[in-house]
Image (spheres, helix red, strand yellow):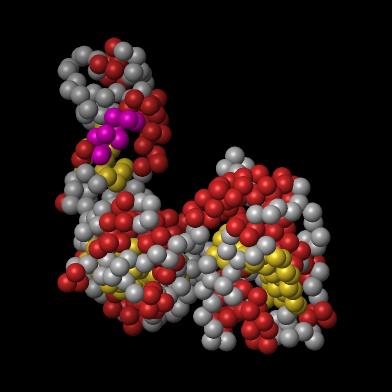
Amino acid sequence: MTNFRSEFPAFAFVDIETTGGNLERDRITEVGIVSMQDGVESRWEHLINPETLIPYNIQVLTGISPAMVQEQPTFRELAQLILDQLHDKIFVAHNARFDYGFLRVAFKRIGIDFRPKILCTVKLSRFLFPEQTRHNLDTLIAVHQLKVLARHRALGDAELLRQFWDCCMTQFGVSKMQEAIDHLLPQQSLPPNIDEAMIKDLPDTPGVYLFYADNRRLLYIGKSNSIRGRVLSHFSSALRIRKEMKLAMQVKDIDWIETVGEVGALLLESKLIKEKLPSMNIRLRKSTDLCAWQLSLNHDGILVPKLVRHQDLSPGRQENLYGLFYGRSEAIKTLQVLAKKHTLCEGLLGLEKLLPQKSCFGYQVKQCLGICVGQESILSYHDRLLHALYKYRVGIWPYKTAIGIREAHVVHVIDHWCYLGTAIDESEIFELLNSGIPEFDLDIYKIVKKSLGKMGPGKIIPLPKPAQTTEFESY
């Protein structure tokens, strides 16, 4: 063991066992805590009656059976003891979001707001050992030769974290470990115009937050799965990142809108940024020159691209579109890169003037295979052109109707890649469907396309017109 522990604040190395991985449905069955304070170690553990079934696979993994917890106290009965063990200590856990998340929700059920400072040993391992490809607990055991006393039991795994800390201290010393803590531990250093009471009101849920300057001038809109955590990260980053410092010094007020999940937060953030144009948001600004390439046959039967500009675009309805691009210069630059990478003819791509019966310049320097002067077959050229453009293809809307993306108790209404809004019942759905399709937005398209790729069964529902049946069926 090392003698460095008294150099740091008090730590609580924490591990829990549960009946499963669902924060709302599953419950805690065991808590183990190894505390380090002023150079003194202490240990605390307790089984907990989860008041629900323990699945057989969980019993096999942890060795905790229903008989073992039947006569044990409930979490409510042990809550104060657990709080006493964690009081004024930095909460250290492996994949800390899991352990902290379960404890936070368990405390919340009994009316206790649990918000410790959190240090994740997965992130600590990544910071100190960036050359390692894996950082799970079994990897740490093997790499650092940790002594396993009771794997998948709360105190046994908490003890492994304490051993890992000792290994890191021995290898890196106080200075480097302090650097790691400063880097990883969220520093709740608030801007001068934001009081602590406002931060305490921020929810630990998904949603969108809005930063205001003087006179309610909107500075910035962001989204997160934890509004409170993300806002605090802005302020802690202000200590070392100039852009965040500039933002933090101007913030006078904070608003937020909660959503039921990540998809809703992404859609709302994009929509609000376009509507409100906050001064410090750049990436999601509205595009006024959206364009895409569209292929058509020229007089020689060769596919050539034509730039379709914003006013003529109807993504999701038009065939043969490739892009999309925020402007003409981006579209041309992309085509130039593809031409070089795939030895395509820049003359036929419209990137240089092609004279009758003459080759393009690329053919002369062996960067074109000669389609422009008949030295390559049209079929071969088309194969290479379509292969080069494949990942840029803009898909036709794949559904017969508008759809809803179900997220918790709400439905996000989407039609031809456009976001119409979010509804909580059928009347709101029909109101959105009858409000007309908004202007196509590239950021919304990317969000929807990515979200649909991750949707499970029952999450996507077709949305008929109000005159049709109101019973929605899952795809």
Residue 315: say if magenta. Answer: no
How many numbered discs, if any?
0
Looking at this view, name the residue that lies furthest to the right.
67
Q: Residue at x 36, y 23 (%)?
A: 343
* 202 vs 323, nearest the viewer: 202
User: Residue 21: x percent and y percent?
Assistant: 63, 69
Front one among 16 and 119: 119
Q: Quadrant of residue 147?
A: bottom right
Q: Up-down: is 24 above or below 141?
A: below
- Please state the horizontal and vertical placement of residue 288, each as a whole percent of the image: 18, 52
Of residues 432 and 207, the one nearer the viewer is 207
Please tell me which residue is depicted at 58% across the width and 81% down the height of the picture: 107
Relative placement, left or right, of 194 versus 158 is left
Q: Is residue 130 visible?
A: yes
Image position of 71 with respect to 14: above or below:
below
Q: Left or right: 247 with respect to 386?
A: left
Which residues fall within the magenta stretch? 330-338
Relative to 117, residue 431 above or below: below
Can residue 54 be seen by looking at this rendering?
no
Q: Is residue 333 magenta?
A: yes
Does 187 appear above or below 198? above
Q: Who's the residue at 68% across and 67% down the image?
A: 35
Determine the main secondary structure of the stretch shown in magenta.
helix
**Foreground pick, 60 / 196:** 196
Residue at figure coordinates x 21%, y 14% from the top left: 358
Residue 319: image location, x then y, percent: 31, 47
Q: Position of residue 377 (x, y in %)?
A: 36, 21
Asked whether, in this view, residue 383 is left or right of residue 443, the answer is right
